[in-house]
Amino acid sequence: MPPEVNIPTIYIVTPRGISGVPNPLYSYQFHPVPSSTDFPPTGPPGSPPIWSFPNTAITGEWAVVGSGNGGHMSNIPYSSFDPIFWLHHTNTDRLFALWQAIYPDSQFTSQISAFKTFTNDAGKIEDANTPLTPFHSDDSGTLWTSNSAWSTKTFGYSYPEIVDWGVNSSQLSSNVKSRLNAIYNPTSTTSKRSVSGADASSELGLSPNTTSTQWFANIRVSKSDIASPFFVHLYLGPAPADSSTWSFAPNLIGSHSVIDSSMLSTADAGPPTTLYGQLPLNHALLTAGSFDLAPSKIVPLLTSQLNWRLQSTSDAPLDVSKVPSLKIHVVGQEVKPRVSDDEFPEYGHLVAYRDVTKGKAGGLQDGDDTE
């Protein structure tokens, strides 16, 4: 998490000098405090109480995106009161805008709604013209749709990587690719021997252009196995004995969150929903000093060192054997480096390495489907 969201108090210059004020990115303060009829006292079973933090503030640290242990981002009806909700969704909007700029001919596809919401029934076909309730585009009751909200220009803003004036769509696509490569995929002539630890992961592991193989852990689990939000933590090496430190362990590879929506009753929730997640492994591997990412080196290492734990949002450990739908497996993918600034690397097919997780509770076993 960026330090800006972890500091309770910030200091600003005022006409009377420097003054400390509550950090608006750290927590939300209700003004006034809602009555008991405005919000239920607790969320879904196993979730933290809505008033679990001092001064009825909702915490600014959010585990679903970052590293923490629940907060209120794991409860959908409460999540938008968490300040980091807006930072997260702003970046989601940015990523979508980048995709649109790079692939201007991309279109929405229609889908059948799997769940009932306050305004739509399960089984209804939703497309680019489906009203995005309850958001109105004017005072006469017109609702926004995916088509009408397609472009950020409609709302009068853009992002630093998207300079979308004075260029055609092809030029814009090329320019945005160049900007993203400069940020996330720079070329590097740094010797593997000259960097180590965190520097190695930054120089080598997070840039597809500087490695021949990308490694991932795929996670598949049903929301119905546990009736409340929970996390799947992956580690390179053993997990700490103290479960309260699981979210912050030095050898934590990453966490996959399984959230629910307490707005849905059991009858409305529809059939069990399978969730899919993928955690990149290169960062952890390179930080641990594994510079040779060839399968002959990585498969034995992960077979002996890859571990996982399940945890509730209240830090309680969960029994993996009670989650029969959990299937974790490792895949590798060859990468062909980009040859110019406005091109992306070329990725080969994902290859599943079943032996890494076979025989472990929650791992992919012989006969299990990889999808």
Image: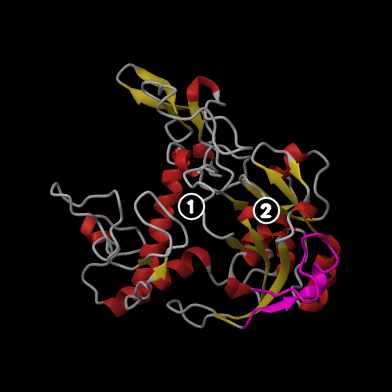
In this view of the protein, which residue sits in the foreground, 195 or 114? 114
133 left or right, relative to 142? right
User: Label 1, on which residue?
Assistant: 268
Number of residues whose C-alpha sits closer than 10 Å to that of mark 2, classed few (under 14), some (14–19) or many (20 or more):
some
Looking at the rendered structure, which numbered label has been put on residue 295? none
Answer whether residue 312 is magenta in the image: no
Front-lying residue, 213 or 328:
328
**Amino acid at dot 1:** Asp
Q: In this view, does 259 lie to the left or right of 268?
A: right
Reply yes or no: does residue 352 show up in magenta. yes
Quadrant of image for the N terminus:
top right
Q: Quadrant of the C terminus?
A: bottom right
Residue sitting farthest toward the top: 16
The residue type indicated by label 2 comes to: Asp
Disc marking residue 225: 2
- From the top left corner, tell me how far across and down residue 195 is, in percent: 70, 61
User: Residue 171's spot in the image, x, y percent?
Assistant: 30, 77
Q: Which residue occupies 54% across, 36% down? A: 43
Give left or right: position of 41 versus 312: left
Q: Range of the magenta residues?
A: 349-371
Front-most of residues 88 and 263: 263
- Residue 253 location, x and y as percent? 70, 56
Residue 277 falls in which quadrant of the image? bottom right
